[in-house]
Amino acid sequence: MNTYKSPGDCLERLRFLDRERIHLCRVAALLQWDEETFLPAGGVEERAEQRAVLEGLAHEKLVCAETGELLDKLRDHASLSGTVSDLQNGAGGFPVADFLRVLRRDYEKAVKIPVDFVRECAKAEALSQAAWIEARKHNDFAAFAPHLEKMIDYAKKKAEFWGWDKNHLYDGLLDFYEPSFGVKEIAAVFSPLRERLQQLLKKIAARPKPVDAFLHQNFDISKQEAFCREVLAGLGFDSKRGRLDVSAHPFTTPLGNNDVRITTRYAPSDPLSGLFSVIHESGHAFYELGVDSALRYSSLADGTSMGIHESQSRLWENVIGRSRAFWKPWFPRFKECFSKEFGETDFENFYRAVNIIAPGPIRVDADELSYSLHIVLRFELEEMLFSGQLSLNELPGAWNTKMKDYLGVECADDAEGVLQDVHWSMGAFGYFPSYALGNLYGLQFWDSLQGALGDVDGFLEQREYGPIHSWLRENIHRKGRSVEPAVLIKEVTGRSLSADSFFRYIEQKYMELYAF
Amino acid sequence: MNTYKSPGDCLERLRFLDRERIHLCRVAALLQWDEETFLPAGGVEERAEQRAVLEGLAHEKLVCAETGELLDKLRDHASLSGTVSDLQNGAGGFPVADFLRVLRRDYEKAVKIPVDFVRECAKAEALSQAAWIEARKHNDFAAFAPHLEKMIDYAKKKAEFWGWDKNHLYDGLLDFYEPSFGVKEIAAVFSPLRERLQQLLKKIAARPKPVDAFLHQNFDISKQEAFCREVLAGLGFDSKRGRLDVSAHPFTTPLGNNDVRITTRYAPSDPLSGLFSVIHESGHAFYELGVDSALRYSSLADGTSMGIHESQSRLWENVIGRSRAFWKPWFPRFKECFSKEFGETDFENFYRAVNIIAPGPIRVDADELSYSLHIVLRFELEEMLFSGQLSLNELPGAWNTKMKDYLGVECADDAEGVLQDVHWSMGAFGYFPSYALGNLYGLQFWDSLQGALGDVDGFLEQREYGPIHSWLRENIHRKGRSVEPAVLIKEVTGRSLSADSFFRYIEQKYMELYAF
């Protein structure tokens, strides 16, 4: 079919095909971004078809016979004139071996999925997401259930196509988001995590609750938005390379190497909800924006795993965004914006309120302790749905029961219960655990960062985020997908992933805050 | 290559290919819409590549061997089991013969253009548009000139590919936008048009000028926008099927059968500029939104020519939007929104100010008389550029000279002169004449509409736009591209296109207004 002779020719052609596919993926991402931000209601059905066409084409580009042939030729380079290793230090520092490894894995995952199935899925996902938006608005789980059932079926079929045994389909999905993590590995981390967090929650429940009534007044949305934009700019988010908009569920999407868009949502009664979503998503965006430009327009220009991605967003949201040092310079400004609402509130009260441990039904608004319990709940329910232990009509009840057991929270309705997250409506099963893994990765990175930078609090107090960005970019972001997560964590921190840093951070912070 | 036996099979496959291509075209349109509304500056370069990939793919879909084979088989249907005529009254009333005719023409136009050229063009266009936006902002024709030169070269090459003789390349471009109109045909209409309009302008210049100082104050942009949205909704624009946003140059783009987006721009010192752009673009949008849903997702789901498209936008903007009857109910509301600015202005003064004949440099802000002179100027300059009578560095000067000759206007700088329009930056040469043709088509339709509906002013005075929409939809919109413009005008009005209706309308309206 093709007549490329030298490894150089093969590689050039492979990079061309990859580049076209990456463009199609970015365009598909624009279709989705637009659907969640600006698409008129009447456009939903046609948009689903458009997405199906685009995602189908991107899939075809990846799985085409030529890609397979080129990958094979480059593996068996002995038979070609010249070798791939000649190309290792190619122009612009493009890491050829990593590119071939990552592309081969993507290719092998994708080639097993029939094109028609990809298109069918993409279309169903778009309809399902639209149905979820409506169902959530009208608190109508029944209206969403048929879509959810389809999404589960599609996810199961996908894992089957990848070659997973009928009894381990959920493992296949978990592995997709975080390579080499399955039900067993995650349960081994999550069971003790759940126990230790529940113990901590009990200790905290016995302590006096900080006052946070001043945070629950009517905060003007446009003033909230202005403050969020100020913080975002202060953090170093370049408005020439990205945007902030509003959507039902906050998300980040890279539409280009220099066009990474984030969204948030504002609640009048909670000025921190929208703000922390902005800070969270900016962490994702900094990761995408920090990928080395040598990798752009290629399969390597992305985060290396969902867990590593979440480590970045959760570092910015929690470790930085909920710290005393961060708020020292920002609180006076926040108080200026809402002088009537904050009145005489002093800094220490505000800081305690920001870090109040108050289990509630909504994951994205959860405190640092409750958050991981929300994740454990989702992981367990997903596992039960995929193993057949739980049927769809039992799901809202099971959700509410676990919510009560783990967090002591009663859900008022399904809109703030089982319908709260976008993920399932997109068929993203197995994704949730990466949020909790992100906490672990994140704190382990943070320990190293502090070791390298010294007085990080001093920087935060001066709103000097440059050194933090530089360290994260140099050690993590710039590498994109060229380094696997398990290798990255060891390369950067000197040790394999463990929960030590996370527990030490959580215990120290909340022992101090709650004085136990 | 394919094994479709019956005309039914062939048609089904052809419609599938066509549908995929239409989806790709809509997606390419979204890329462009986003570029002009929300794209961060850093994303321009990558967006150009994305557009190139999408437009290349859409082109490939159209020119693929299979399309050609299927078209041939369906033309030579005698050799197949069953005939195309069996399909004429197919399910959903889809007009098969029109579809085959239009698709064959598009195919034959496109198959002559090499795919690589299409991609190169698309990429250059995106860069050119971005350069134009900057050049216009900084009044820097020199910065835009290299892009413009490229756009002219590409347009010439395109006409050559289509098979036009080197001496008639501009004819090829004109014909593309308005079939069977070339330099000779258009000059034959435009020369007398220019003379008659110049005569009218002279008569008007001798009459006292209406007062319009009250229209040139500082009109708050957000209040302007609110009023525009109110008018747009009042006209019957369904926000579930479209959007209104802001861009450097107003435009309309259909991103789907139920997602047609328009843009405008607001000037603080002129509350009518943004408003009339909104009304103009809504006329385009009503056309697209009125196409029969049986035609959707096919090559027939679009306006039949640029001239017919402009007839719709200019009907709404001028014939309706600048009429006494239209403003009777809207003026009191407009006055409410800007009570301080309008003060004691009475209706008759306002109506006269709305229709003031005041030649100025900007086409989109031009009065109904000057407008066509702006078009004649552009047509003549395009003709000179393509015939080699004018070089690019002479262009700004030639622009200014003609502007002075035809309209008596001095351009302050190139930003309000040769740089004012987006069209050339997109390589859309030969497009401008369709604006003036639109005036002629539009008034001829309007005569028939009035004949059918009777007291149209009565409807306008009641803000009852339903009967007008129904008539336009039934007679023009629903047909999409299934009827050619020359056939359509005869089918709807009983006669071929002439300037009679337009002249009668213009002369009556302005004789009354200026009492000569």
Image (cartoon, coloured by chain):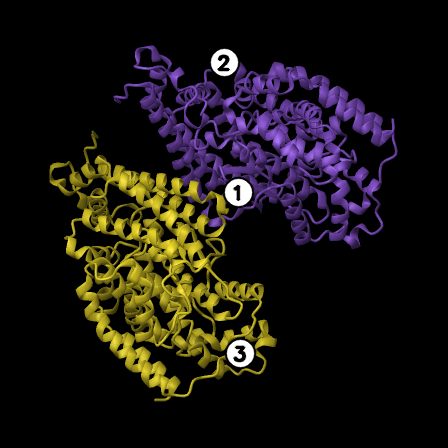
Chain colours: A yellow, B purple
Q: In the rendered view of the protein, which quadrant contains the C terminus of chain A?
A: bottom left
Q: Identify the residue position indicated by label 1 in the image.
A: B241
Which quadrant of the structure image shows residue A342? bottom right
Q: Amino acid at mark 3?
A: Phe
The residue indicated by pointer 3 is A214
Relative side of B396 to A304, left or right:
right
* Residue B59: mark in rendering: none
Q: Are marks 3 and 1 in contact (CB under 8 Å)?
A: no
Q: Nearer the viewer, mark 2 or mark 3?
A: 3
State how far apart marks 2 and 3 are (Cα): 77 Å
x and y, in percent, of residue A222 in the image:
57, 63
C-alpha separation, residue under disc 3 versus residue under disc 1: 42 Å
Relative placement, left or right, of B490 versus A206 is right
Judged by depth in the image, the label closer to the viewer, 1 or 2, is 1
Q: Are marks 2 and 3 on the same chain?
A: no
- Asked if one can make out residue A459 in the rendered structure from this viewpoint, the answer is yes
Residue at image point 72% right, 23% down: B502
Callout 2: chain: B
Q: Residues within 10 Å of mark 1 (few under 14, many from 20)?
A: many
Q: Which secondary structure, mark 3?
A: helix
Q: Quadrant of the N terminus of chain A?
A: top left
